Image: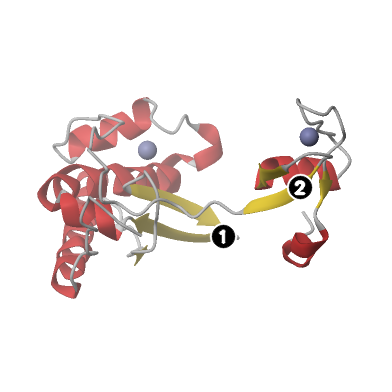
Amino acid sequence: MNQKIPAIDPITPGQQQQVIERTSDLLQQCQNHFGRAFKPIDLRFDLRGRSSGMYVLKHKQRYLRFNPFIFAKYFDDNLATTVPHEVAHYVSDILFGIKNIRPHGKEWQAIMHTLGVEPKVTGNYNLSGIPLKQQRRFAYACGCMTHQLTTTRHNKIITGKARYYCRKCDRQLSQKKSTQRIAVAP
Ligand SMILES: [Zn+2]
Ligand SMILES: [Zn+2]
């Protein structure tokens, strides 16, 4: 494959260390401001796609995910803005409970101000060279061609929530046998 845009390498272990230190520094600032301790939070550098960072609360586990490619391309900006953005999600969850507040509501914004960062939501990065999330596709046949359906559509079909028809031949789409082994139950 001929790629015109050079691929970006993920951040180095040294840069990961800087993110770890920045995170604990921000948590220390929150501790000083709110007068209570916040447990260190796990960081994972495994986020892919168009987001720079994400706060995750799953099965009572809390962690931050960062995109090592976007961080590599815009390291200083992500260190300055994305890291506090996600730390503020974590701290607002601990203080108020994630279900009781809007993600970027006044509680989150106040924590961002505490951290000395403008509470902006979207980074405006040029993502060329950033590997995109792999989208799984499922092959379906009608009477005239193969259709590559997204996981969302595929799941609607196998759970009986939707049927899809070919616009050209009007036949209902059915999954091709050759791809059935990668079908996943919802
Ligand atoms: Zn956010
Ligand atoms: Zn067709």
Q: Position of residue 43 (x, y in %)?
A: 34, 64
Q: Quadrant of the C terminus?
A: bottom right
Q: Dot 1: few (<14), some (14–19), or many (≥20) neighbours within 10 Å? A: few
Q: Amino acid at mark 1?
A: Lys
Q: Are marks 1 and 2 in contact (CB under 8 Å)?
A: no
Which numbered disc covers residue 160?
none
Q: Position of residue 117 (x, y in %)?
A: 16, 36
Q: Quadrant of the N terminus?
A: bottom left
Identify the residue at horizontal 76%, vertical 47% (top origin): 140
Q: Position of residue 120 (x, y in %)?
A: 25, 29
Task: Say if residue 62 shows up in the picture.
Answer: yes
Outermost residue toward the front? 144
Ligand 1 occupies quarter = top left
Please determine whether, in this image, residue 154 is positioned above or below residue 108: below
Identify the residue at horizontal 18%, vertical 41% (top origin): 115
Q: Which residue is mark 1?
A: 60
Instruction: Kindly indicate the quadrant of the structure image that contains residue 85.
Output: top left
Outermost residue toward the left? 76
Q: Residue 117 vs residue 176: left or right?
A: left
Task: Say if residue 28 shows up in the picture.
Answer: no
Q: Which residue is mark 2?
A: 140
Q: Which residue is at the front of the view, 52 or 177?
A: 177
Q: Amino acid at mark 2?
A: Tyr
**Looking at the image, is mark 1 or mark 2 earlier in the sequence?**
1
Q: Residue 114 vs residue 167: left or right?
A: left
Identify the residue at horizontal 69%, vertical 52% (top origin): 138
Identify the residue at horizontal 33%, vertical 58% (top origin): 38
